[in-house]
Amino acid sequence: MKELLLEIFGWLGYLERPSVLLQLGLVIAVLLLTRRAQRRRWLQPLPLRAYAPVGILTLALGCGVLAGLGLPQGLASLLGLQWLGWFGISLLPQRLHQLESRLLRPAYLVGSALLLIREVDNLNDIAVIQLGEVLGVSVSFGKLFNSLVVIYLVLVGCGPPAAGVAWLAQRSLGLSDGSRKAMELMLRYLVVGLGLVGVAMHLGINSTVLIAVAGGLSVGLGFGVKEVFSNFVSGIWLLFEGSVRPGEVLMLDGDPCEVRSLGLRATLLWRNRDNAELLIPNQTFFTTAATTYTASDRMRRSQVSIGAAYHHDPAEVIALLEATALEVARVLPQPAPKALLLNYGDFAINYALRFWIANPMDNVGICSEVNQAIWQAFRRGGIEIPFPQQVQYPIAWPPEDHQSKQVNSI
Amino acid sequence: MVAKCPRSGMMGQIVPSMAPPPAPQQPRRRRDRLLSLLGGLALLVPLGGCTLGRELPNVIYVAIGANKDQIIDAELKQEFQVGLREVEARFRQIHPDTHFQFGLYPEDQMVEVMRQRSRSGLAPDLLLVNGDTVLHLRQAGLVDPFPIRKDQLAIFNEEELGRLRSPDGQLAGLPVLVQTQLGCFNRQRLSEPPATLQELLNATANGHPMGLSLDLYYLFWIVGSTGALPAIDKAVLGQPLNPADRQALTDWLAWLQNASNQQRVTFFPDQPTAEAEFKAGRLDWIPCRSIVVPQLRQVMGSALGVAPLPDGDGHRASPVNRLRVLALGPSSSAAGRRRALAFSSYSVNPLTQRTLTLGSQTVLPANRFVTVPVQSSQVLAAMVAAANQGLQANSLVTLVHSNDPRIPRLQTLLTQLVFGEANPNGATTELIEILQARP
């Protein structure tokens, strides 16, 4: 490490050279002027985005002048090109934002840094600098750099390929969406695991030593970061078990919630009612009971309750309710809707209409549609939905004096 | 400063600023001011460079050319580092607070590297490269002429200095060291090293495995031993070749093919492979460079023997010894150039040259007034003999640069010959054509 720091510190000596300072001064001056011009809108008709190209053009002109005078300008040109590339990345479409922020910009920064280092030193030479020993293996800067790049790429870049393989598997094996998402996640874990093992092998770390260290770490993990580790293991377990997979619908505090993703520590759920995203630690699902509508299939049996007046024939009402449910588009025809006479209420006969829906998350909306259809059907069929009724008797005391002539209906 | 004050109109009235309220802008303004300050400093430093320059480390940037048979790895870097640290420590006794930063580059990429770094003004202050490379760099304008002092002229061999002069008569670099080509053998298996080509073949016939590299650089010594060197010189110079010259060339090629037919002579694709086999004890003799002797000794210990390469019948071997030269990069500051020149002078003074030679036992001094104690060391004696052997190849080395496009063609021809794809007579004609085709 000391050697690497000395190497980096040694580059400062280049600042002794007037030609280097001139180039750096030119780049810094143009950058500052461009920033100021942008903030103060010096070039008013130009849109804000056009200031950077103007700055780059100015820098290019400056480099041209230096070249014309026979002075070195390679460093300023390189920095200008890097600025141009950075600006170019910002022009990418918005839909590539995640790719841009997670992969393109970091990769561009690393590449630019390497190009700048190549201007002052030999990259191969720096790569062989020994930084120290890890588990009895000497680690060079190059090896460490490659390992970090591989780990980063594996973590960031394994998503799209894993999704692609899972999609192919879904197409060829006819898997459900939930299984596809679970497979995608497991593939990601697998690739990350293989990547880490590959990096360890690239570094030349002895597998026996790794196992010994893992044994020691497991004790530490058991005490130190128990919760994190417990959540991680719960997540893996749930994934393999298939009970909590992305796309599943679970009841949480009486609300149906859809599993969006199963992370290393927590599961992300989406609640339709208020569009809230809930982060629930994985071990919650591991240790407490949960209701799911999507374990074996995604169908849900739903129900609405309705009261009809006593003078209507219950058989007619039941037939009308079942026919009405079938008219609602999102109610499944099979299993067929079923209406039941539940009980005789105070002022109405109470019925329940049970029907099946394809997506549990749509329950509230479909119930509303069914209720509306019932109202319309009752209106057409002349079936009364009675208001609550109560008969009150004024009573005289003692009861012998009571005359049941004054009756008030409310 | 501007951002802090309200802007005034011509009559001194306050012009309302369009900027947002000042409070959220404070951190950004502070950052801008800091950036302005840094930018201003960067612009002012060239003017006041003398003052600020004193605070910067006194670094001599040295680019060292690694030959293609040297793999740039931690081991090689360590080797150079150890050697340079000793020199640095001694140099700092005279010039305190001077640090060295060296970078290893493949010798055949040196022109490209220097071109790129000179464009940025970041070329190293000094280059330690082969004599032919420095001429190439000078012709491309990538190193400055070396301002040798008159008193320094006398300490070098006039012919050597002549070979380092560019067509405009200026010196491309300062000769510092000579790396020689030797024969390395396993003492435990081979009591006496082969002194002639015939002895070499006899030893193989007696059961001693020998290794040769297909690399032209490591095969060229046989040209001298077979007496073909004058013919090669003539062909390269474009002079007509008489039948005797042709025959000499055919003899060289025939010897190579004959050797490849021997059961115990193995041709390896490159020198590092041959050295690895030698270290592993599977070969008894190989050609080697003086610079690898410490590495071989580290593995083989006292079993390693070193001798000059085998001569021929009435002809001396023609090893390609490498003259290592210090050259001046074109981007140095005035102070950097002073330091580079001071170190150059220091590196050729007799004491340093003697220390380098005796300390490393891998190089010979370029300073002709430094006497090499050949009696005290067999390695040094072999190196001096090799240096004398190599004198006859010096003119050819100047004419054919290591990046010469004819070399890959020659390499292919020799490979075909060794594998029996070409016969010596046919190969002679092709050889002459290649050598006479000037790039």
Image (cartoon, coloured by chain):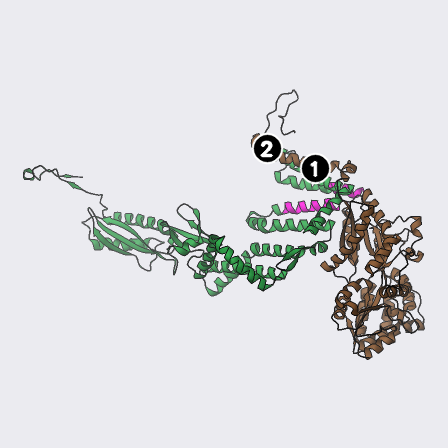
Chain colours: A green, B brown
Observer-nearest of A344 and A255: A255
The circle drawn on residue B213 is none
Nearest to N terminus: mark 1 or mark 2: 2
- Tell me which chain the residue with mark 2 is part of: B
Q: What residue range appears in magenta?
A: A61-88
The circle drawn on residue B39 is 1
Q: Residue at x 48, y 60 (%)?
A: A183
Above or below residue A68? Residue A264 is below
Kind of residue at badge 1 = Gly
Asked whether the beta carbons under mark 1 and mark 2 sit within 8 Å of each other, the answer is no
Judge from the rendering whether residue A237 lies leftward or rightward of residue B215; answer left or right.
left
Dot 2 corresponds to which residue? B26
Above or below residue B375? Residue B91 is above
Q: Residue at x 61, y 61 (%)?
A: A205
Q: Is residue B266 magenta?
A: no
Is residue A241 at least partly visible in the picture? yes
Observer-nearest of A99 and A142: A142
Q: Residue at x 85, y 53 (%)?
A: B352
Q: Is residue A76 magenta?
A: yes
SS at circle 1: helix
Seen as rendered, the residue at the extreme front is B376
Structural distance between the alpha carbons of marks 1 and 2: 20 Å
**Magenta span main SS:** helix
Judge from the rendering whether residue A397 lies leftward or rightward of residue A228; answer left or right.
left
SS at circle 2: helix
Q: Do the residues marked 1 and 2 share a common chain?
A: yes
Is residue A37 at least partly visible in the picture? no
Kind of residue at badge 2 = Gln
Q: Quadrant of the C terminus of chain A?
A: top left
Label 1, residues with CA under 10 Å away: few <14, some 14-19, many ≥20 = many
Judge from the rendering whether residue A372 lies leftward or rightward of residue A348; answer left or right.
right
